[in-house]
Image: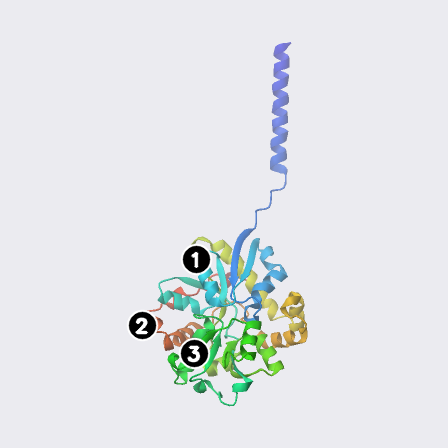
Amino acid sequence: MNHAFSRSARLTKFALASCLALSVFSSPAKAADPQKVTIMVGGITKLIYLPARLTEQLGYFKDEGLDVELLSQPAGVDAENELLAGAVQAVVGFYDHSIDLQAKGKEVRAIVVFGQVPGEVEMVASSQAATIKSMADVKGKTLGVTGLGSSTNFLTQYLAHLNGISSSQYSVLPVGADNSFIAAIKQNRIDAGMTTEPTVSQLLKSGDAKVLVDMRDVAGTRAALGGTYPASSLYVQSAWLDTHKDEAAKLARAFVRTLQYLHTHSADEIAAQMPKDYYGSDKALYVSALKASLPMYTVDGKMPADGPDTVLKVLAGFNPSVKDKHIDLSRTFTNQFVNQVK
């Protein structure tokens, strides 16, 4: 009796265990947790960096299984510092930082190129327009940039250098972007300065500033710099890239998808995807600025063929630390991940 009961109990336990095992293996697999990536943007409301927030708004990060957090700093150099400190995994900023940093012994690499031109404009305060008619006239003037060591600072120095003006002959004042740049113009703290859309359109509409050098399209950029100037991009530390190729590939797919969206939708349709605080009370101005900016975006995220050489020429033109170093441009960017996108 006891023996039969013991055998029955063992069979019952075996049956229960088998059912439990089957239920475990037949149940749907738990979805993997999204891969967390924090990206610092050098001024998230700037149209040159539009792909960052637009990709989030369109849900393309989530489609790739990524949990992306977007943070913002007013200047690209601040975003770069966050990357080097390990506080973020990637930066949406200007490609030229990868060359500047290699000269300083640090390795970062652009993996998606958003802009084939800077999208930057040197604006002159209307009160100074009669005396500053080109960059040859900035001697003794105060020029605004987003931050010291920023790409706006690089470009300002080069444009002055091209016109025979050394960096000791004018002052540079970091004034940030957007409203802080507009305030600097209105308060006469700067005589001219470099900024992007939609700030350019806001200053033109108010009449507070005029265009001095326009690098919002390929023609204007070639006239100013002698070639295309790949600018806004997604860059990461090379050491991170070596161990996170899966995340890099997913980021590339998400961003290329956004670049394709930009070239297949109207400015009105794109603006409708953005948060209201991006255009405030003047959506028409934002749409107009966006429409003018669309040609600057690449279609496929690839580095323009003549781009790295132009950027190196610009930086070496005024920066001795770049001029005197051998820069291996092949280590400053890669098309590996965007080439995989169908």
Separation of residues labelled 2 and 3 (CA atoms):
25 Å
Residue highlighted by disc 3: 171
Quick check: can you spot residue 61? yes
Secondary structure of the residue carrying numbered label 2 = loop
First in sequence: mark 1 vs mark 3: 1
Quick check: can you spot residue 178? no
Percent from the top left, x then y, of residue 16?
63, 26
Task: Please tell me which residue is depicted at 38% across the width and 79% down the height of the picture.
Answer: 168
Residues under numbered marks 1 and 3 in contact, where contact means CB atoms less than 8 Å apart: no
Separation of residues labelled 1 and 3 (CA atoms):
29 Å
Percent from the top left, x then y, of residue 203?
59, 79
Q: Amino acid at mark 1?
A: Ala
The mark lying in front, picked from 1 and 3, is 3
Residue furthest to the bottom: 130
Q: Residues within 10 Å of mark 1 (few under 14, many from 20)?
A: few
First in sequence: mark 2 vs mark 3: 3
The mark lying in front, picked from 2 and 3, is 3
Q: Amino acid at mark 3?
A: Ser
**Residue 322 falls in which quadrant of the image?**
bottom left
Task: Please tell me which residue is depicted at 39% across the width and 68% down the height of the picture.
Answer: 100
Residue highlighted by disc 1: 85
Q: Quadrant of the N terminus?
A: top right
Observer-nearest residue: 201 or 327?
A: 201
Residue highlighted by disc 2: 324
